[in-house]
Amino acid sequence: MGISDWTTREACSRQDQVLQAAARCFVEEGFHGASMSRIAKAAKMSPGHIYHYFESKEEIIKAIVQRDEEGACDFLERFRSYGPDELADQLVGCVIDGVKGNTDAFHSLLTLEILAEAARNPSVREIVADVDRKFRRGMADMLEDRLGLEDALMRVEAVSALFSGLTIRAIRNPDLDLERLTSQIQKALRALLEP
């Protein structure tokens, strides 16, 4: 391992530290309530050090969204190795994790903060929409290719609406019966994956 590898890894670790601290601050104080100095304090860094990695809070929120894109790419990659007979079952099987993730209080609040900023800020909206578009297209391509589904993009849109809605439902109804809800979502997903 060379010095440049170590430096790159260290920078990624520090950036990740900033992103985690910023996410906590956005959830606790809102995007506009969280100052760069507050984020720096939460990250245990000086404000100048934060600016070394990110020029603004907008750049931080964009980096958080880009991190979500990496997660979406990993998700798609995980399913590319499955053939037609296994793919639908594997996708339905991952609903449990999807429900847990989309009803997690921290995730829900952070998602709503990001979407609120995307509604106000065209450059954040653009990156949020781009990440969503890439994921939907990647998933639709996989469903068309592996399962031969017609209208796959609209099916993916329906699934996306279902999971995005979980974020709001988790806030509006904190007493959701997640086990029963998961079962219903699995049934809905299985129906959407039928040719």
Image (tube, helix red, strand yellow):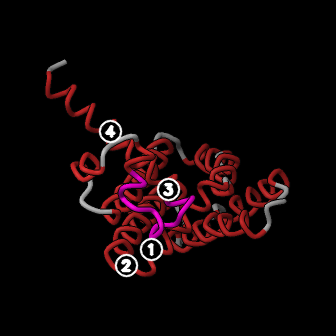
The residue type indicated by label 4 comes to Arg
Residue at point 35%, 56% (across, down): 63
Which residue matches tag 3? 25
Which residue matches tag 1? 117
Relative image position of residue 80 (x, y in whole percent): 46, 45
Picture quarter with the C terminus = bottom right
Relative image position of residue 155 (x, y in whole percent): 58, 70
Please tell me which of labels 3 and 1 falls first in the chain: 3
Picture quarter with the N terminus = top left
Kindly state the secondary structure of the residue where label 2 is placed.
loop
Residue 55 tag number? none
Q: Nearer the viewer, mark 4 or mark 3?
A: 3
The answer to whether mark 2 and mark 1 are in CB contact below 8 A is yes
The residue type indicated by label 3 comes to Cys
**How many C-alpha atoms fall within 10 Å of the one at disc 3: few (<14), some, or many (≥20)?**
many
Residue 14 tag number? 4
Residue at point 67%, 51% (across, down): 95
Please tell me which of labels 1 and 4 falls first in the chain: 4
Which residue matches tag 2? 121
The answer to whether mark 2 and mark 4 are in CB contact below 8 A is no
Q: Residue furthest top?
A: 1
